[in-house]
Image: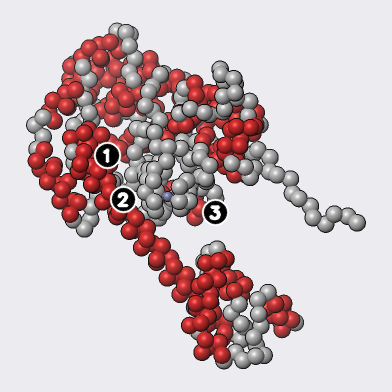
């Protein structure tokens, strides 16, 4: 006799990278999670057993002791991952899921990659709402980018449910868009109130930088290869002549660069770091894309911008910070802890005072810890409230479905109820549904008794009976 049960072959190591060719391109580490998920293996299995990973030390395992944040970056680590994984998935465009195409324009930059896994909850929500799979963007890995250029809300690095922040999504239990610790969904519809205030100088700067990098990621590989820091320096004399009336010192003062630094660039002794390019782009209000392409036409037509640089850290800035009203800042921070609306995180608290988180933490370590805990507590309470609201909505829908079935003289068995709930857009796991169904059924005992014996049609039989009745 022939075998009746055919075991389907395991999926090959293939998955289509998402957002390729756009600024919303997926990052390599997120793509690897999808590849593993499609092949029904853990990411570690791919990393340890399936790729040809040449290490200098014998028996050293793939990815061991490696900075996972650098996988998507511009350096040697990214190059090794791309060349190791490409044969497995049979693709030659994995480089586009990293910053490697922009390596020439960025130079040997350090600190480009964010050390934490970050995401825009609204982007993840929209992925699913549009009927697609959620995925994590390369843009979110760039440390300079702190807000989503599309939704203008701050990127998030802590799970809203458990508060844990991960280094990378390449861990055993992570799925794209889900927390690796508690497995909660990280997407969320956000209200307009969460948007960064573009009226403030810091908010406008953050949105500028996010869009600047998004525009760079929108470039194809050939255009990205044409960018270089030499070209950016080439436009500086034009900018100084037009926007600063030929006065180099004026540019140095506005952008908070030392005269020696700018002199070094112009005389070809050094090249600007990526941080300096980001600052130049903001101060001159020339997109990095034009700056790195050496677009002299754009440079020749710009006027001196009046944008603020007060929030950028620099040596001159540190001197002026001595005159800060520290007592007032401390009062603000303390008041927030006792208020019923504490800051969502230490990052948000520091930002509201016009500081970056680490220097302010160094001054107020105890307050930083308390604000972090208060924010975590607030996020947990919000998550619990959301869960409760979901449970209530599910129960109400179950009651309505059961009443409807009883009205149509059908027994509200779990399969029938589940089917009706799905039609209303509600979905839950079988065990949770069983509990809710049992409790609602006991609440509706009086209405159930009106069904009598003849109409008491159970479980899977119902559809069959319904079809028979229809005939
Ligand atoms: Zn977004
Ligand atoms: Zn979590």
Q: Relative to 56, say whether 62 is above or below.
A: below
Alpha carbon separation for disc pair 2 and 1? 27 Å
- Residue located beneath label 1 in the image: 204
Alpha carbon separation for disc pair 1 and 3? 32 Å
Quadrant occupied by the N terminus:
bottom right
Q: Residue furthest front?
A: 59
Q: Decide if ligand 2 comes within 8 Å of the CB at mark 2.
A: no
Q: Which mark is residue 376?
A: 2
Alpha carbon separation for disc pair 3 and 2? 31 Å
Q: Relative to 470, say whether 119 is above or below.
A: above
Work out whether mark 3 precedes mark 2 in sequence or the reverse, and give the earlier one.
Answer: 3
Q: Count the labels in the image.
A: 3
- Residue located beneath label 3 in the image: 131
Position of residue 313 in the picture relative to residue 442 (left or right): left
Label 2 neighbour load within 10 Å: few <14, some 14-19, many 20+: many
Could you say whether the residue bearing mark 2 is in a helix, strand or loop?
helix
Could you say whether the residue bearing mark 1 is in a helix, strand or loop?
helix
Residue at (28%, 15%) from the top-left corner? Answer: 237
Residue 115: quarter of image: top left
Label 3 neighbour load within 10 Å: few <14, some 14-19, many 20+: few
Q: How is the image coloured?
A: secondary structure
Residue at (64%, 42%) from the top-left corner? Answer: 39
Q: Which tag is nearer the camera, tag 1 or tag 3?
A: 3
């Amino acid at each position: 006799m022939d075998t009746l049960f055919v075991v389907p072959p395991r999926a090959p190591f293939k998955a289509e990278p998402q957002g390729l060719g756009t600024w919303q391109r997926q990052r390599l580490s997120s793509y690897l999670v999808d590849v593993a998920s499609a092949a029904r293996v853990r990411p570690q299995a791919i990393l340890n057993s399936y790729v040809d990973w040449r290490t200098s030390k014998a028996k050293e395992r793939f990815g061991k002791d490696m900075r996972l944040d650098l996988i998507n970056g511009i350096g040697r680590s990214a190059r090794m991952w791309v060349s190791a994984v490409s044969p497995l998935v049979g693709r030659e465009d994995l480089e586009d899921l990293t910053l490697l195409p922009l390596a020439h324009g960025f130079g040997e930059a350090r600190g480009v990659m964010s050390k934490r896994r970050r995401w825009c909850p609204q982007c993840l929500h929209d992925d699913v709402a549009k009927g697609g799979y959620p995925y994590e963007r390369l843009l979110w890995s760039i440390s300079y980018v702190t807000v989503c250029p599309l939704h203008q809300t701050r990127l998030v690095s802590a799970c809203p449910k458990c508060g844990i922040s991960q280094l990378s999504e390449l861990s055993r239990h992570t799925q794209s868009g889900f927390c690796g610790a508690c497995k909660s969904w990280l997407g969320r519809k956000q209200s307009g109130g969460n948007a960064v205030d573009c009226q403030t100088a810091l908010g406008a700067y953050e949105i500028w930088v996010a869009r600047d990098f998004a525009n760079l990621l929108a470039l194809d590989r050939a255009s990205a290869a044409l960018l270089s820091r030499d070209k950016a320096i080439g436009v500086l004399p034009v900018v100084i002549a037009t926007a600063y009336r030929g006065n180099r010192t004026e540019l140095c003062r506005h952008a908070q660069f030392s005269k020696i630094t700018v002199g070094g660039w112009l005389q070809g002794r050094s090249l600007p770091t990526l941080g300096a390019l980001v600052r130049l782009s903001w101060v001159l209000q020339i997109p990095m894309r034009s700056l790195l392409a050496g677009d002299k036409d754009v440079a020749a037509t710009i006027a001196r911008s009046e944008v603020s640089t007060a929030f950028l850290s620099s040596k001159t800035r540190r001197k002026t910070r001595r005159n800060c009203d520290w007592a007032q800042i401390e009062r603000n921070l303390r008041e927030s802890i006792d208020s019923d609306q504490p800051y969502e995180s230490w990052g948000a608290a520091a930002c509201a005072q016009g500081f970056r988180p680490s220097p302010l933490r160094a001054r107020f370590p105890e307050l930083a810890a308390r604000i972090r805990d208060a924010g975590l507590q607030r996020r947990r309470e919000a998550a619990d409230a959301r869960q409760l609201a979901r449970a209530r909505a599910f129960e109400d829908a179950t009651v309505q479905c059961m009443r409807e079935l009883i009205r149509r003289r059908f027994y509200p068995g779990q399969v029938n109820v589940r089917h009706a709930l799905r039609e209303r857009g509600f979905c839950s796991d079988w065990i949770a549904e069983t509990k809710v169904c049992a409790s609602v059924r006991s609440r509706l005992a009086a209405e159930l008794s009106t069904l009598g014996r003849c109409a008491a049609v159970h479980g899977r039989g119902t559809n069959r009976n319904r079809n028979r009745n229809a005939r």
